[in-house]
Image (cartoon, grey):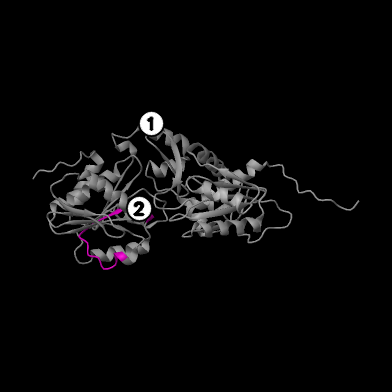
Amino acid sequence: MDVKLYTPHAKQLEVHHSCDDLSYLFTVVCAGRQTGKSTLAQNQAIKWALEHDDVVIMWVTPFQSQANKAYKEILKLLTNAPFVASHKAAQGDTEIIFTNGTVIKFRSAGAENALRGETVHFLVMDEAAFIKKTTFDEVIFPMLSTSGQKVLIISTPKGKNNWFYEKFLDGKKTKETSTKSFHFNYMDNPHTSKFVVATAKASLTPTAFGQEYLAEFVDGAAVIENIEECCSGRMQLLPKEGEIYFAGIDLALKNDYTVFSVVDSTGNLVYFDRFNQVTAPQLKERLVTNLNAWKPQNTLIEVNNMGQVIYDDLKSIYKVKNIQPWLTSHTSKNNIITKLINAFSSKDIICPNDQNLKEELDVFTMIVTPSGKATYKATEGFHDDIVMSLAIAREAQTHAGNNQFNLKFVNY
């Protein structure tokens, strides 16, 4: 049966030829946005599945949400295909089975225990730079020990202090026999949207654009700069007498985190409380405890989705004062995030030296939609709840005005 897949551009075709060459194990691809790297990997997985009977192909991503997305996109490519025997999407057990006995399994690198003991013939590591080196060394690589034939490691770069960078360099060594590396960017893709790229170039810092679109290995390419320098403070567990505070609340009930952040009169982050997997009553009680402890002069709470109900209850049932609703829209979010980015860029903010906070700041990125809108969000699979809560808290300070006076009477 003749099966027509997509028409690859020249750089994609080079990678496919490499994936067909089983004389070496690793094909490493460093590619940025607007390059067609996802399309390349998806079509290669299908190609392996059709050309090899009774083999296991595993697609590994940093997070389950990314694996689910890849499953849906590949399944869409295979709509009504007669060689698909069955498919299923279940937590930790998502797969497509072909009539020749081959299966493509979609897994998260975060679920290490579920990966242990698997035997794999072909492997795709998607956004590999965001997968931990220990996970690759101790869990993923051993899956290839008995039957492994080919590994496609593909990713946007994430600095030089990363195992993906080291693996990419391996494939560039003249005497290397197990790895071959490829590099391409948006200019190599004839289908690139020039409008999207132009918008991104105007919105991103040069280093961030170099990483995201030129696929350059550069350090300090995060949208938010000076993270280590600005995150050098200590978490303040109690309010200081005489200080004025402002709070921002980013709400969630299930997988994401609710975060209550407090900034002082200069906009520095002094405290945050991050929690998830709570009921609505538990969430409200915890917020009230924080509000009573810090007594912010102004609090903004996100009221998207279930937030309006939480806000109404805090006002009417718990009698919380100095709290205002905050509706997150594309415009309002971009506005407060731009202010936060500028604060870090000018080193005009101090935050606690907290690992969760620094990780969120580091993976916070900007994407450009096909319509040309710049949107800020966490890299897919990561969280941005602390970042959003911090940005909202600083906006609460702005809404309350910057010329605040702490007045008291003295003896006269």
Q: Residue at x 21, y 61 (%)?
A: 148
Q: Badge 1 local density, few (<14 within 10 Å), some, or many (20+)? A: some
Q: Which is more N-terminal, label 2 or label 1? A: 2
Q: In this rendering, would 84 be left or right of 224? A: left
* 123 in the magenta segment: yes
The image position of residue 83, as x and y in percent, is: 13, 49
Depth check, front residue: 146 or 111: 111
**Magenta-colored span:** 114-130
The image position of residue 344, as x and y in percent, is: 56, 46
Q: In this rendering, would 278 be left or right of 261? A: left
In which quadrant of the rendered image does the N terminus lie? top left
Residue farthest along the left direction in this orientation: 1
Image: 356 above or below 322: below
Q: Is residue 23 visible?
A: no
Residue farthest along the right direction in this orientation: 412
Q: Does the residue at mark 1 contact the one at mark 2 (Cβ under 8 Å)?
A: no
Q: Badge 2 local density, few (<14 within 10 Å), some, or many (20+)? A: some
Could you give the CA–CA distance between mark 1 and mark 2, rounded to whole angstroms?
28 Å
Mark drawn on residue 65? 2
* 193 in the magenta segment: no
Question: Residue tagged by mark 1?
Answer: 195
Label 1 secondary element: helix
Q: Amino acid at mark 1?
A: Phe
Q: Amino acid at mark 2?
A: Ser
